[in-house]
């Protein structure tokens, strides 16, 4: 008697580029930077609970994280900058899920996120980051979250420090990135920064 196996589950998402991306087993060939930029510019940080006439998008958060990372690690290379810029790339298809909900969902969500991030890295020739770079990404992410919490999400400074740690002094050019932009501007700026980092 021939043993049969159920096919592996799939979760296909049709992207605007025409690619069909399997969220459970993503292939690097199905990743397109235009899809990432389009999606991240339309995913709201803080579930949209921010001040201003426009949402503060994950695309803008990514630009802020890259700028913060470069400020606190001046020797950062453009390839390392690309890792900073793309650290939240999976959210172009799975959305921005707040940390308490991520903790409640647990490993199921984290597994999807990590597989998508691995596919993004594979598509753009990025290796798994060394521990030092991983720590830089996490630190820059927390600093950016602190800035966003105070400037956009109504946190008091001490409340933001409790959740995200203290934010260092940053130049105005970096802090200015925490101002919500129109969607088209966020998408264009993200794409432009990606292309600049890829030229080296």
Image: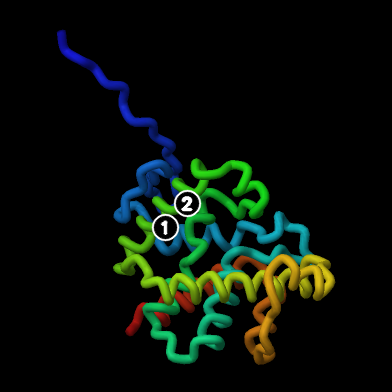
Query: Mark 1 packing: few (<14 Cα in 10 Å), some, or many (20+)?
Result: many
Foreground: 118 or 28? 118
With 24 as the anchor, is 102 left or right in this view?
right
Which element type, helix, strand or loop, lies under badge 1? Answer: helix
Residue plotted at (47% across, 51% down): 113
Q: Which quadrant of the structure image shows residue 80?
A: bottom left
Residue plotted at (32% across, 50% down): 27
Whether pointer 1 and pointer 2 mark residues with C-beta atoms closer than 8 Å, the reply is yes
Q: Position of residue 143 (x, y in %)?
A: 64, 75
Residue 82 in view (yes/no): no
Q: Return the mark for residue 87.
A: none
Residue 31 in view (yes/no): yes
Foreground: 66 or 131? 131
Q: Which quadrant of the structure image shows residue 155?
A: bottom right
Q: Position of residue 53 (x, y in %)?
A: 78, 67
Q: Quadrant of the C terminus?
A: bottom left
Q: Position of residue 109 (x, y in %)?
A: 52, 45
Residue matched to label 2: 113
Q: Position of residue 191 (x, y in %)?
A: 48, 72
Residue found farthest to the top? 1
Residue plotted at (52% across, 62% down): 88
Q: Return the mark for residue 117.
A: 1
Residue plotted at (48% across, 61% down): 89
Query: Mark 2 packing: few (<14 Cα in 10 Å), some, or many (20+)?
Result: some
**How was this image coloured?**
rainbow
With 191 as the anchor, is 147 left or right in this view?
right
With 199 as the anchor, is 48 left or right in this view?
right
Which element type, helix, strand or loop, lies under badge 2? Answer: helix
Q: CA distance from mark 1 to mark 2?
A: 6 Å
Q: Quadrant of the N terminus?
A: top left
Measured along the vertical axis of the image, is residue 66 above or below residue 74? Answer: above
Measured along the vertical axis of the image, is residue 32 above or below residue 186? Answer: above
């Amino acid at each position: 008697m021939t043993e049969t196996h159920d096919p592996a589950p799939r979760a296909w998402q049709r992207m605007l580029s025409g690619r069909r991306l399997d969220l459970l087993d993503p292939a690097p060939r199905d990743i397109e930077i235009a899809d990432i930029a389009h999606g991240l510019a339309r995913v709201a940080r803080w579930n949209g609970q921010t001040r201003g006439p426009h949402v503060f998008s994950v695309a803008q958060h990514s630009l802020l994280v890259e700028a913060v990372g470069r400020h606190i690690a001046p020797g950062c290379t453009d390839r390392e900058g690309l890792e900073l810029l793309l650290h939240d790339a999976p959210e172009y298809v799975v959305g921005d899920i707040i940390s308490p909900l991520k903790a409640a969902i647990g490993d199921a969500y984290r597994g999807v996120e990590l597989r998508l991030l691995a596919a993004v890295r594979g598509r753009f020739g990025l290796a798994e980051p060394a521990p030092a770079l991983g720590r830089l990404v996490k630190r820059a992410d927390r600093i950016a979250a602190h800035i966003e919490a105070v400037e956009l999400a109504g946190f008091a400074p001490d409340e933001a420090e409790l959740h995200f740690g203290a934010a260092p002094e940053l130049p105005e050019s970096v802090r200015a990135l925490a101002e919500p932009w129109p969607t088209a501007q966020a998408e264009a700026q993200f794409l432009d920064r990606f292309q600049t980092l890829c030229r080296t």
